[in-house]
Amino acid sequence: MNLRLFNTLSGQLDEVLPADGAVLRMYACGPTVYDYGHIGNFRTFLQVDILRRALRLFGVPVRHVMNITDVDDKIIRNAAAAGVPIAEYTPKFEQAFLEDLDSLAVERPEILTRATQHISEMVHLVERLAGKNAAYRTEDGNWYFRLKAFPEYGKLSKKDLEGMTDGARVDVDEYERDSARDFALWKATNAGETGWETAIGRGRPGWHLECSAMAMEYLGESFDLHAGGEDLMFPHHENEIAQSESATGKMFARHWFHVRFLLVNGRKMSKSEGNFFTLRDLLLRSYKASAIRLALISVPYRHQLNFTFDGLVEATSAIDRLRTFASRLRAASLEDGSTAAGLATAACAQESFLAALANDLNTAEARAAIFELVRDGNIALDAGRLRSEDRDAMLRVLDVFDSVFAVIADNDAAPTKTAVEWARAHGKLNEVAPELLAASTLTDAEIDARVEERNLARRQRNFRRADEIRDELASLGIILEDGRDGVRWKRK
RNA sequence: GGCGCGGUACCCAAGUGGUAAGGGAGAGGUCUGCAAAACCUUUAUGCGCCGGUUCGAUCCCGGCCCGCGCCUCCA
C-alpha cells in the first residue's frame, strides 16, 4: 500500500515515494528557539512525526532534516534584554525543545541542523543568486531577492503577485528595494550587533535563507518533501522556492505538506486571549504526555483542531481503554490454536488502519479501526472464544497501531517528572497541580505500607477504617483499585 | 478587499449519491463489603438554512446564515 498525501503545490492527493527509489528525503521547518514550545508548535511536529512513522510502516525509509532557527529578530531582542549573546541564550530553549519532543514521543529527525552553523552555505547561496541577477545589494548593505527574477512566484500559495499589493500591509518605507515585495536574504548589521563578517558583507541571514541552504546541503538541490505549519506556506515556503529554484534552475521540493493551525477553546491561541499553553504548562497541570499526544494527533492534519481540556480528559480515557485491552489480552490464559473469527477481526482491523493512514493520514479513521478491534476483542475474551494465536494476532495489530500513534506503551512517568523538576528549578512550583506534588512526597514503599494497612482492616471487615485510608490516599493523588488479584494503586 | 476551510448526536470527530464509523460523557446491566476499575448494551428517521439536479442527497450544484484560518512575526 502506498501513502497518498495532499500536496499543496499540486493541489491534489499525490503518492509519496522517493524520487531516487531508495530513501525519501524530507525537510521540516523546525522551531525558532526563543521560548518554550507551545501546543500549537507541537501539533505540527507531531503530525510530521505521524508522517515519518507512517512512511516507515509503508516500507519507505526516510531521511528527515529539521532546522533549529537559532538566530532571528526575536532571539536577538530577547538575548539583548537578558544581556547575553545569542549563543548563550538559545541553547537552553533548544534543549527544552528536544526534551519536549521526547516527552511527546516524537522521533528525532535523522539530521538536526542549526542556522548559525551554516552561515557560509547561506552566503554562497546569495552569491549564486547575485550571479544570476536574482539578488541585489542596497546601499545600506542589505541583500534582497529580486522577485521579478522568478515569474513563478506564488505557485505554492496560489497567490497572484499583481493582486497582492492591494490590501496587503507592505512596508512602504523600504524605498531602496526594487519592489516592496522583494524579501531580505541578508541583513546588514553594525559592529556591536549580532552578525558575521562574510564575503557579502557584515550581517546576519534573513529567515528564509537558512532553510534553502540547509535543505540543499543535506538533501540535495531537489528533494522529495517539505513540511511545515500552514502559516509557513506564505511567505516562508514561497520564498524558499523562489530563491532555491532561481539559484539551481531545478525544482526544489516536489511535495509540500502543511499542517493546519489549531484553535484553543475555539480561538486562535495567543497570549492576549489567555489560551496560550506550552507543553510544560499542561504536564504541570497533571495531564499525561500520552493524552496530549493523542489529543493533538487524533484530528487529521489538514483539519482545524480545537484543543480543549475536555479533549485532554477524553484522550486520557481513550488511552486507558487501549492499555487495559492490551494488558487484558496479555494476561488472558487461552487455549492453543486460533479461530477464524479471531484472526479475521485482527486482519480486518489492521487493513482498515493501514487504509485510513494511506488515505492522506486519516488518523481519526485509523483510530476508529483500532477501537473496533478493542470492542470485538473484549467481546471474544468475555465469551471465552479467543485462542492464543488470535490473541497474538491482535497484539501484533496493536503494535502496528502503536508504531504510529505511540500511546499504548506507557512512558508517562518520565515527562511528568521532568516537568516537575523543571518547575522546581525555575521557581514555578506554584504552577504544579497539588496532587502531582503530593504524590511525589510519598515513596512507593510508603504507599505499599498504607495499602497493606488497609488490607488488614478489610480482612477484619473494618470497612470504615479501610475507606478512610482509601480517601486519604486519594487526596494525595493515589488511586486504589480492589481487584480479584489484590489491590492495585496508581498515581493520578 | 483577495484566497481558503468548516458547520454531523450532550461534547469531540470520521464518512459515503442509496439511507449515519469511532472516542468521551450520560443511562441500564455484569462484577464488588462499598466504591473504583473493567466489560457489555444503549443514546442522530437525521448530518446549519432554503432552493435545484436525481428514482434517491448529509454527501453534487446555486443562494443564504454562522464560525474559523491565511493574506503581517507566528507551527
Image: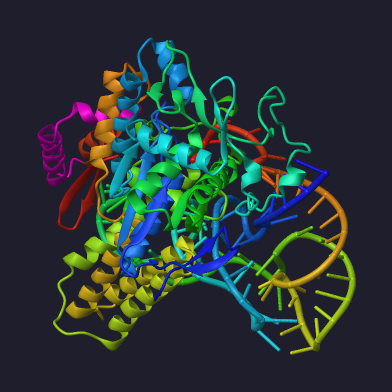
Looking at the image, which residue sits at the far front?
A: A131
Q: Tell me if residue A18 comes above or below residue A133 in the rendering.
A: below
Q: Residue at x 31, y 73 (%)?
A: A377
**Residue A349: x, y in percent?**
37, 74
Rendering colour mode: rainbow
Left or right, residue A340 beside residue B51: left
Q: Residue at x 34, y 59 (%)?
A: A53
Viewer-closest of A126 and A66:
A126
Q: Tell me if residue A162 comes above or below residue A255 in the rendering.
A: above
Q: Main secondary structure of the magenta part?
A: helix
**Residue A17: x, y in percent?**
40, 68
Q: Quadrant of the N terminus of chain A?
A: bottom left
Viewer-closest of A252 and A483:
A252
- A153 is within the stretch colored magenta: no
Q: Quadrant of residue A193?
A: top left
Viewer-closest of A449 and A407:
A407
Q: Quadrant of residue A350?
A: bottom left
Please state the extent of the stretch shown in magenta in the rendering.
A433-462
Q: Quadrant of the C terminus of chain A?
A: top left
Q: Tell me if residue A412 comes above or below residue A5 in the rendering.
A: above
Left or right, residue A376 beside residue A450: right
Q: Residue at x 37, y 70 (%)?
A: A375
**Residue B31: x, y in percent?**
27, 62
- Does residue A60 appear in the picture of this structure? yes
- Does residue A472 appear in the picture of this structure? no
- A437 is within the stretch colored magenta: yes
**Residue A126: x, y in percent?**
47, 37
Q: Tell me if residue A434 comes above or below residue A382 in the rendering.
A: above
